[in-house]
Image (spheres, helix red, strand yellow):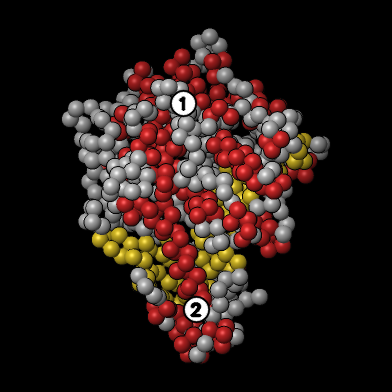
Amino acid sequence: MRTRPALVAACGTAALCASAVSASAASLEQACAALPGAAAGDVTITLAQFHSADPDGLPEHCQVQGEINRRVSPVDGQSYAIRFHLRLPTDWNRRFYYQGGGGTDGSLGGADAPVIHQGYAVVSTDSGHDNATNTSGVAGSFQFGYDPQARSDYGYNGPAQVTRTAKRLIQAYYGQRPKYSYFVGCSEGGREGLMLSQRYPDYFDGIVAGNPGMDLPKAAVAEAWDSQQFAAVAAAAGEITVAGNPHLGRSFTDAQLAAVADAILAKCDALDGLADGMVFNPQACDFDPAALGPSGSGELSQAQVTALENVFAGARNSSGEALYSGWYWDPGLRAFGWRIWKLGVAAAPVNTAINVTLGGGALPFVFTTPPNSTTGGTDLAAGTQVVAAALPDAYVPWVLSFNMDTDAPKIHARTETYRESAMDFMGTSSTDYRAFRRHGGKLIVYTGQADPVFSARYHVQWYEDLIRASGGLHKAQKFARLYLVPGMNHCGGGPATEPSDTFEALVAWVERGQAPAQLLGAAGPGTDWPGRTRPLCAYPEQARYVGGDVEDAASFRCTMPAGGHPVHGDYHPGHGADHPVFGRD
């Protein structure tokens, strides 16, 4: 059922306005223009504009922009606000859709998710800081990490405030609140989805959290660890950037990564019952990169073998205690999406790895407490100055100087000024879903096995813990399901059949009670098998070939792996010892 808005002030009450399903264009424009009057408290509407339908763009709708809690920071003197962008379609389907953010947020977003064409009201936000204005010569767009409130807004308060404000404006415009509310995001947006399911369990009826940045500060520590391993390879080979830093992008050639991927396939492809260029049973993949080293095929140096061993085992301190999870051996590491995060472009004269640009700025300024000064926080070489204007190599000295013994614990540190640690405001691995379950919420989490920044093994660890906390697999799957995507990099890419029906599956689960036993995965034109489909099974089930066309999902069934599943304690995916020493927050 679709609802057309009318002007609340003109027709007296929200109930009367809700009945005005054929409002004129004039009254629609009036209703939109009247929305600034619906703002309350610290909310300011900066734009309320009515748009006619654009045949090549958006449907007829009211566009609203505003900000919450505009203030000046007592710490860094900069002006901050939680900005939001809301679009209210004329033909509303009584549903609300929150479009998740990415990176460290700081971008308002277009609130233009395709579902607006289906009648969804859509909102996006910068989560409390603006990458264009909250900057400095040292910290660049990570300057907001100096302001305690901006940290909290980024971690949880911004999305919560925007959700409440958007729902109030929806009610003011349409005369009724949404019947169903959904959140969809990937990466940082996926982390936001998990955060909302845990901190604000009754805000959304359904959430999709793709490749979520779960416990993101720990993943940032792992980014530094990985970069140090690859930097050691580059330094040993004399591969240095024009800025004088080890060139991570030249630590491995594309041909060498392809050789590693081929070796993984040779060892592990058939473990799921079919050699098809995909590893659907990563827990059973016991790959050893030494097979490609000097004592093996000779395609890798010993330094390269050691780096891969250290990276895939996961970040550790000098006592051998895990600081993050290890990673699955997956042939998706040959893809550009893996390289650009962990290594960067070999042909570039400077480091371009996202681990040392985005991750390299977030770690010292947002996830370290207190945030680093020009040369403070992590000790650097004498006289070293870090200036954001010198990007992309600007943060490399911090990353390579990051100490796993003395700096890693700073993600848990608090001070009188910074009363919340990074893990306090960013932690998202709670397994207490009692309130979410009571609300009737549904959660879909999917993750790429070859995600180079957020480990799928870490997501599996969390889900196994959730199974136990929920009283078993059957009970956990009533409200939360996890899907592994073989070959997929971060939020897409790689030799993968990527999920193509995630949101549709969520809506069917929320509104019709149809729990998704599997998602449909489809291979894109850039893969070796364009058009291939596979079932992406709800963990711990895995896809098994049962006969027929090997390119068709209908030829596969989701089955439990040999050895049982976690709820009975007899399923051992090979990473139980990798639980981080700091524990889950």
Residue ID at (50%, 55%) = 199
| Residue 506 in the image, given as x and y percentages of width and height | 64, 56
* 223 left or right, relative to 211: left
Height in image: 543 above or below 108? above
> Of tags 2 and 1, which is closer to the observer?
1
The residue carrying mark 1 is 321
Depth order, front residue of 523/331: 331
Amino acid type shown at disc 1: Glu
The residue carrying mark 2 is 173
The residue lying furthest to the top in this view is 295
* 311 left or right, relative to 496: left
Badge count:
2
| Residue 158 in the image, given as x and y percentages of width and height | 41, 59
Crowding at dot 2, Cα within 10 Å, few <14 / some 14-19 / many 20+, comes out as many
Amino acid type shown at disc 2: Tyr
Q: Calculate the distance from the C-alpha at mark 2 to the C-alpha at mark 1.
A: 54 Å
Q: Do the residues labelled 2 and 1 touch (CB within 8 Å)?
A: no
Image quadrant where residue 540 sits: top right
Height in image: 16 above or below 573? below
